[in-house]
Amino acid sequence: MASDMASSISADLLPASAAGDEVSRSVILRVSGLTVRFGGIVALNDVSFDVGKGEIFGIIGPNGAGKTTLFNCLSRLAPIGADAIEFDGVKIGRLSPSRMVGLGIGRTFQNLALFRSLSVIENIMLGAHSRTKSGVFSNVFRLPVARREEERVGDEAWELAKLVGLDSVGHVSAGDLPFGFQKRIELARALAARPKLLLLDEPAAGLIHDEVEALGDLVVDLRARLGLTVLIVEHHMGFIMKLCERIVVLNFGRNIAEGTPSAIQKNQDVLQAYLGTAQRAHC
Ligand code: ATP
């Protein structure tokens, strides 16, 4: 099934003449010549790649390679050139950061930012905030419009909790649950904003072997059910090589390789820059 999926995605990415369609229709994210400087440090240096709609796409590289900076650019938390990133036909550098809300890019963070005293469901509901319409007035005075909206968001949060396997602990405080559960809360919270593109920042970090396996299955399942495109930054080589259809490798801010997991594993530049040490550490 995975190889069927991969071949249909590669067909999507064929040049226009071969695919019988315009290639831009199937590319959901295009990064072109992205450069980011922090003072004298060049965190990203002329990085370019495309991500196809529905792909599970990996970004790897040694510490300090620029992976988090890239995610921050996609979330508009780092400065970008006007035309450097095009998402779903929109050049996001031309939008004010506030207009990023609702564009369809959701994200989880390396360091979990959950409200520990709130329940699983309440944490997930917070992720839907960008989609709610009732204003401060109707919320403060508990007007029917606000109550109906809260009920709807609550129902959706329960559905998401079920989807990620948390419905049995929906009423439990997030802070009372083990780390693996907390990572799933954050995932469900990102999904509550109904993203088209989901950015997962080191989702496997801190998980035990069985949890990593289950997470991989969950990501594949969520992609199929919700029609997601998924971008993953990860140091866990086993996880990324098994899950991703294509991978970009960054080193000192440069894109040094791009391709399928098997091509990346054989790439001499990658082996030299990164995989040799990473494989010893993680596989
Ligand atoms: P890791 O795997 O350790 O998380 P990374 O690949 O995510 O690393 P980045 O965090 O993107 O790497 O950092 C890339 C480079 O940019 C590093 O040299 C880092 O020190 C620098 N950098 C990142 N953010 C800033 C900032 N806000 N100010 C100054 N330098 C920064």
Image (tube, rainbow, N blue to C red):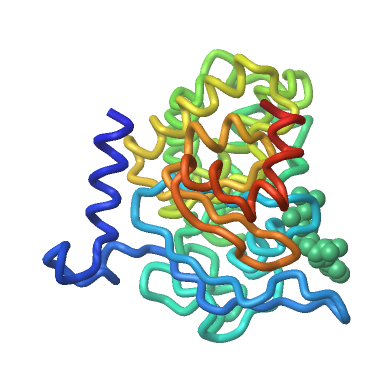
Q: Is residue 66 left or right of residue 270?
A: right
Number of dots carrying numbers: 0
Identity of the residue furthest to the left in this view: 20
Give the quadrant of ligand 1: bottom right
Horizontal and vertical percent for residue 151?
Answer: 46, 37
**Residue appearing at x 26%, y 43% in the figure:** 7
In this rendering, does residue 140 appear at all?
no
Q: Is residue 48 above or below residue 246?
A: below
**Residue appearing at x 59%, y 45% in the figure:** 200
Quadrant assignment for the C terminus: top right
Identity of the residue furthest to the front in this view: 268
Horizontal and vertical percent for residue 145?
Answer: 44, 51
In this rendering, does residue 197 appear at all?
yes
Horizontal and vertical percent for residue 142?
Answer: 56, 47
Q: Is residue 100 left or right of residue 176?
A: left
Figure quadrant of residue 202: top right
**Residue appearing at x 39%, y 47% in the figure:** 228
Q: Is residue 73 above or below residue 242?
A: below
Quadrant assignment for the N terminus: top left
Q: Is residue 214 left or right of residue 253?
A: left
Name the foreground residue: 99 vs 13.
13
Horizontal and vertical percent for residue 171?
Answer: 62, 20
Identity of the residue furthest to the right in this view: 40
**Residue appearing at x 77%, y 78% in the figure:** 37
